[in-house]
């Protein structure tokens, strides 16, 4: 029980100290709000402009969740194919690496031009490119990390490839897959925001990135910080939700999710 309280109280205390120091710095230094607004002003702006910012956040969140779902489905399927064929893995995996290390801001304009008027699809593709590699890499590693002795045992008893995959490799890869999914959740949000920045979408269906750009152009720093706060809170919520899901799936049997002894 004390450990649970500490996990909540410790970061909360650090956050309160940081906010207090931030507010004190702004007030003592008399820093203009268009340079650095205080946390109280940011909170007031968030309360006042919350409805409009939440509407834009829902647009960004829709892209994020769609990209995460595509990354999980396509990345997991590709990893299974890699596990079934070594030749396929060594042939395609380098291209997945190339796609991952290429800055999304460099290829996003091309994707937006190629997909023309399909704004949502172009943003989804950009976010998916950022998010899918951790799922592929982690799941492939997990599938290839099955106990060799158990693999030999399955082969000795005449298990088929499908049976070995279902009863041995997939359970062994599940913790790796969930870890990759947690990483991809945050990356999908980042990819969606970066894609919105590049696309420069506007209007009533614009995402939160457009609100950030608009606030920056108008030097509305409290509104900009409020939008950033919403993005950060959304990223934390996605990470926490995926962490809870991982705990539900593997918390009762895998060593990484079991409580640590102090």
Image (cartoon, rainbow, N blue to C red):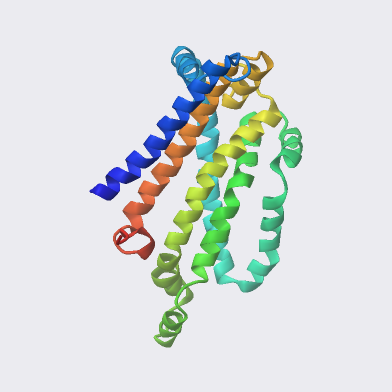
- Kindly identify the residue that appears in the image at 40 percent across and 48 percent down: 243
Q: Is residue 72 visible?
A: yes
- Kindly identify the residue that appears in the image at 55 percent across and 23 percent down: 225
Q: Nearer the viewer, residue 167 or 194?
A: 194
Q: Position of residue 69 (x, y in %)?
A: 50, 45
Q: Position of residue 73 (x, y in %)?
A: 51, 51
Q: Position of residue 221 (x, y in %)?
A: 59, 18
* Residue that lies at the very extreme toward the left in this rendered image: 1
In the rendered structure, the answer to whether residue 79 lies left or right of residue 167 reads: right
Q: Nearer the viewer, residue 41 or 238?
A: 41
- Kindly identify the residue that appears in the image at 58 percent across and 47 percent down: 131
Q: Position of residue 135 (x, y in %)?
A: 54, 55
Q: Nearer the viewer, residue 120 or 183?
A: 183
* Residue that lies at the very extreme toward the front in this rendered image: 28
Residue 19 position (above or below residue 171): above
Residue 117 position (above or below residue 191): above
Residue 193 image-quadrant placement: top right
In the rendered structure, the answer to whether residue 56 lies left or right of residue 3 reads: right
Q: Is residue 67 visible?
A: no
| Quadrant (top left/top right/bottom left/bottom right) for the C terminus | bottom left
Q: Nearer the viewer, residue 13 or 181?
A: 13
Residue 81 position (above or below residue 109): below
- Kindly identify the residue that appears in the image at 47 percent across and 58 percent down: 177
* Residue that lies at the very extreme toward the bottom in this rendered image: 156
Residue 202 image-quadrant placement: top right
Circle count: 0
């Amino acid at each position: 029980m004390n450990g649970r309280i500490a996990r909540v109280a410790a970061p909360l205390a650090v956050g309160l100290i940081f906010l207090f120091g931030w507010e004190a710095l702004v007030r003592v230094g008399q820093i203009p709000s268009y340079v650095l607004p205080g946390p109280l002003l940011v909170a007031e702006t968030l309360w006042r402009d919350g409805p409009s910012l939440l509407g834009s956040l829902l647009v960004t969140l829709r892209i994020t969740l769609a990209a995460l779902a595509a990354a999980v489905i396509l990345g997991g399927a590709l990893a299974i194919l890699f596990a079934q064929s070594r030749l396929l893995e060594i042939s395609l995996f380098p291209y997945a690496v190339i796609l991952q290390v290429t800055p999304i801001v460099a290829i996003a304009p091309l994707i937006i031009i190629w997909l023309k008027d399909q704004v949502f699809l172009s943003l989804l593709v950009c976010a998916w490119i950022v998010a899918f590699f951790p799922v592929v890499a982690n799941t492939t590693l997990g599938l290839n990390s099955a106990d060799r002795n158990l693999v030999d045992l399955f082969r000795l008893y005449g298990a088929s490839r499908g049976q070995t995959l279902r009863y041995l490799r997939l359970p062994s890869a599940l913790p790796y897959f969930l870890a990759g999914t947690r990483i991809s959740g945050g990356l999908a949000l980042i990819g969606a925001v970066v894609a919105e920045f590049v696309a420069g979408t506007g209007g009533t269906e614009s995402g939160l990135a457009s609100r950030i750009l608009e606030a920056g152009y108008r030097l509305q720093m409290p509104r900009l910080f409020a939008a950033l706060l919403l993005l950060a809170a959304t990223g934390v919520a996605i990470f926490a939700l995926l962490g809870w899901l991982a705990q539900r799936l593997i918390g009762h049997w895998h060593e990484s999710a079991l409580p640590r002894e102090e």
